[in-house]
Image (cartoon, rainbow, N blue to C red):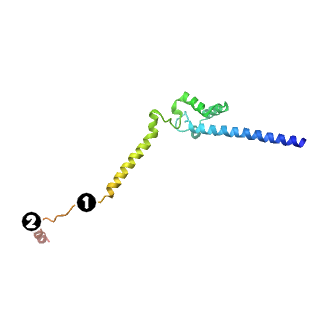
Amino acid sequence: MLKKLKYNILFTTFLASTVLGQTDVGKETLISELEGTLMAPCCWSGTVADHGNPGMEEKIRELVSQDKTKEEIVDHFVGIYGERILAIPVARGFNLMVWLAPVIVLGLGTLVLVNYLKLRAKPQKAIPFKEEKIPYDDLIEKELKEME
């Protein structure tokens, strides 16, 4: 009986630590994702993960510990700092150009390159050479020989 109770306690402890460990891993993953998604507002030169803004990291951990979803936390920071806080712009309105411009430029560049290569690949028609009699050619040749 005592042995069975001992195994039950060990199994329950193992099960609880596994469940709690997965929750902690899930929270750490969410924190890492948020730190990579949000820009550091101190200098706007990199994400929180790259820059290491302690105040922002603490606020993210606080909101995650309150069991807020990723969308709620992102909305919280967008409400404070605006869309500028997002490392990846939202694809709507003028921000849509950030997503479409590279595709358009790549397409136009490919079109120009293909047309250029087609023109270079076509053999150029040779201009026919007509041997014409140059006036005073004989006289010029004679004078050149005399100068030698």
Looking at the rendered structure, the kind of residue marked 2 is Tyr
Q: Could you say where residue 125 lies in the image, as x and y percent from the top left?
A: 25, 60
Q: Which mark is residue 82?
A: none
Looking at the rendered structure, the kind of residue marked 1 is Lys
Q: Nearer the viewer, residue 18 or 62?
A: 18
Q: Which circle, 2 or 1, is nearer the viewer?
A: 1
Q: Could you say where residue 132 lies in the image, as x and y percent from the top left?
A: 13, 64
Q: Could you say where residue 100 lies in the image, as x and y percent from the top left?
A: 44, 40
Mark 2 → mark 1, Cα distance in angstroms: 32 Å
Q: Is residue 126 above or below residue 28?
A: below
Q: Is residue 21 above or below residue 111?
A: above
Horizontal relation, residue 27 to residue 110: left or right: right
Q: Which mark is residue 136?
A: 2
**Residue drawn at (74%, 41%) of the image:** 18
| Farthest residue, direction right | 1
Q: Earlier in the sequence, mark 2 or mark 1?
A: 1
Q: Nearer the viewer, residue 113 or 138?
A: 113
Q: Where is mark 1, residue-wise?
A: 125
Examine the image and state in which quarter residue 74 appears: top right
